[in-house]
Amino acid sequence: MCLSYARRFATCIALVAGSVQAAPAAEILIGDAKSQPESLTIAPGGVLIVGSASSPFVYKVRPGSSTAEKFIDASEEGPGTFFFGMLADASSNTLWTCQLTPVPGTTPMKRHTALRGFDLSTGTQKTRWNLPGEDSVCNDFSVGPDKALYITDTINGKIFRLPAGASTAELYLEHRTLMGVDGITFLNGTLYVNNVFFNKLYRIPVDAAGKPGTPVDIWMDQPVKGPDGMRAANGKLIIAENGSGKISVITVNGEKASVTVIHEGLKTPTGVEPAGDTLWIAERGAGKAVSLPMPK
């Protein structure tokens, strides 16, 4: 997600919404406009889960509910703790989260980050893996065809891989072009990542032995500004552009791609989540989760 780190706010998030599965355009209004929802995901049963980039909490709102429930409380992790990526993995009943905690007394600020997996039903922690190094940014993740979890570390230009059932991730790929790597997803079995620093989209090639190679720059027919959260749906990529306030659909054809803007005028959109006939957007700058009909 985007790297304009927020100050911590003590105000709890309150969500007001109807069913998250409804196709017509809607929004979930967050009581504290500065709560900055960074990422969101849909759990089984249509439960919307929202992380906050300005508080140590993850919230959920059930279909038809008008109030949010505090689902994950990381306040004991240290002052300034907050969350980036959110991903509900129904196959393993796991909510994957990226947790960031500032290191006290560091200038410029450093952050220790952790991949944490919680039971989707109870919120009980199942897995924790701390990213290596004195400073890291666990940002987003995607489950691959091999059922492993692929994780981006934005400031260190790395992708990690956590095999299914494992408790420790391994370095999958490190490359200079990945400095700024943010959104990550699989499209038709192929891994794609974007770069929020340099406004790029890359395909990660894999050889016959399964070893990743040099990221392939995908030429896009129009600029994207601040590509952030990214998911795949209907054979295309959907990207939140945090720098332009747009949501774009990207159609990839080999090493070229066409960009179609489907929504604009948002305040710092940082996450997207396809859910059936609905597309959910984390509008961080406005403190909202917004839904649109899913583009065909």
Image (spheres, rainbow, N blue to C red):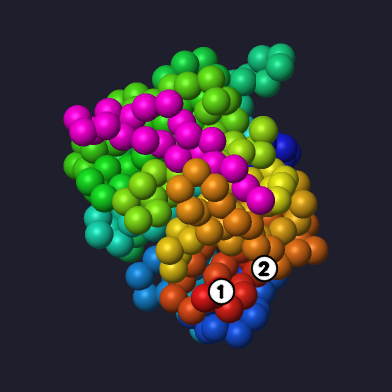
**Residue pointed to by mark 2:** 262
Query: Could you tell me which secondary element the residue under label 1 belongs to?
Result: loop
Tell me which residue sits at (31%, 34%) in the image.
206
Part of the protein shown in magenta:
202-221
The residue lying at 34 percent from left, 24 percent from top is 171
Looking at the rendered structure, the secondary structure element under dot 2 is: strand
Residue 216 shown in magenta:
yes
The amino acid type, in three-letter code, at marker 1 is Pro
**Relative to 73, is 120 above or below?**
below
Q: Residue at (66%, 51%) from the top-left corner?
A: 221
- In depth, the one of 1 and 13 nearer the eye is 1
Residue 295 circle label: 1
Which of 177 and 137 lies nearest the eye of the viewer? 177
C-beta proximity under 8 Å, tags 2 and 1: yes
- Residue 92, position as x, y percentages in the image: 25, 55
Magenta run includes residue 156 = no
Q: Nearer the viewer, residue 246 or 123?
A: 246
